[in-house]
Amino acid sequence: MAPSSSLVAKIKVQLKLSISRLRMVQQKDTAIAKQQRRAMAQLLEQGKEESARIRVENIIRSDITTELLEILELYCELLLARTGLLEAKECDPGLEEAIKSIIYAAPRTDVKELQQARQLLVEKYGKEFAIEAIENSDGKVAERVLRKLRVEPPAQELVTLYLKEIARTYGVAWPKRDDSVIEAGDEDDEDPSGRQAVRSLEEPLTTAELSRATPPRDLGPKSPVSVAPPSPSTDNLNPRLRLPGPPELKPSAKMSGLKNQKAVAEAQTPVENSDSRGKKTVVGGKIPDVDELAKRFAALKR
């Protein structure tokens, strides 16, 4: 038996090869499935529905196989990222599902690199571990892997959904309407006398109702600029459309100070009466007479 370190190195190399091979197989199967879908569209366009229903099952099986290979690729990447845990003698619980799923599903694929990686894992953990994985006695194999490997015909609902999706992708009108049903509907529209049946018309609206009615938005000339309203979000449940208007001018601090000084100056200025209009204002009040001047000189001599 090879030493543990060399065996882990071989497993690591084989996992890398398996990942590359799995990706190539997926790309190849996807290209083939695309050609098959185009052929199904042609069958639907020609009216060969039964043949299309049988052949589309191959496309469904191919898609299931591609999904299985994608799952196995993820398990290989997981083992490659945790190669340090493979050094232990016992299988780590975090790797048990990936290892047993690879041991269980690898023989059911056509990827030889993955089968070789499976043999190395069986050699690493022993035959008893491999038998548990093959029989899935402990239920450690992933359920999605088991579901992809089941061999059973697809449900008719799934077949119909596939055909509808193929017809929608390639622009084929399917399912087509039955002409007999259309003719029967046309016959019901006519009365027994052979005349065209007159459908009941709705009563015309009155003038008051018309005046209260909201005119359609597309009435009249349309603006060359259209602005879509914002969609609601968790932060703004009722969004509103705000259009840009004229800028709102605010006075600066300098202008506000000048206005305040002007208001104070106007308040301190005395208001002249109508009688004093046209008269000259004298600094210091009215002009003193001779007697008053004499009294002032006498007071200064003292």
Image (tube, grey):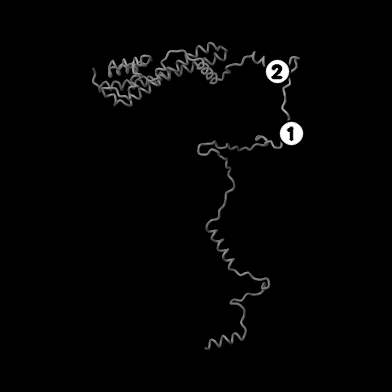
Q: Determine the residue located farthest toward the front in the rendered image.
A: 138
- Please say whether residue 113 is visible from this viewpoint: no
Q: Position of residue 124 (x, y in %)?
A: 27, 19
Q: Quadrant of residue 113?
A: top left
Q: Position of residue 239 (x, y in %)?
A: 55, 39
Q: Secondary structure at mark 2?
A: loop
Q: Amino acid at mark 2?
A: Asp
Question: Which one is in front, 62 or 187?
Answer: 187
The numbered disc on residue 235 is none
Q: Amino acid at mark 1?
A: Thr
109 vs 56, left or right, is left
Which quadrant would the N terminus be assigned to in this image?
Answer: top left
* Residue bearing mark 1: 206
105 vs 155, left or right, is left
Q: Quadrant of residue 68?
A: top left
Dot 2 surroundings within 10 Å: few (below 14), some, or many (20 or more)? few
Q: Quadrant of residue 10?
A: top left
**What residue appears at the point 45 percent right and 13 percent down from the top-left corner?**
152
- Please say whether residue 67 is visible from this viewpoint: yes
Question: Which one is in front, 130 or 106?
Answer: 130
**What residue appears at the point 54 percent right and 87 percent down from the top-left corner?**
299
Q: Secondary structure at mark 1?
A: loop
The numbered disc on residue 189 is 2
Question: Which one is in front, 42 or 83?
Answer: 83
Total tally of numbered discs in the picture = 2
Q: Position of residue 129 (x, y in %)?
A: 30, 17
Which of the two discs, 1 and 2, labels the residue nearer the N terminus?
Answer: 2
Mark 1–mark 2 Cα distance, whole angstroms, equals 30 Å
132 vs 38, left or right, is left
Q: Does 236 appear above or below 153?
A: below
**What residue appears at the point 57 percent right and 50 percent down from the top-left corner?**
248
Q: Position of residue 36 (x, y in %)?
A: 49, 15
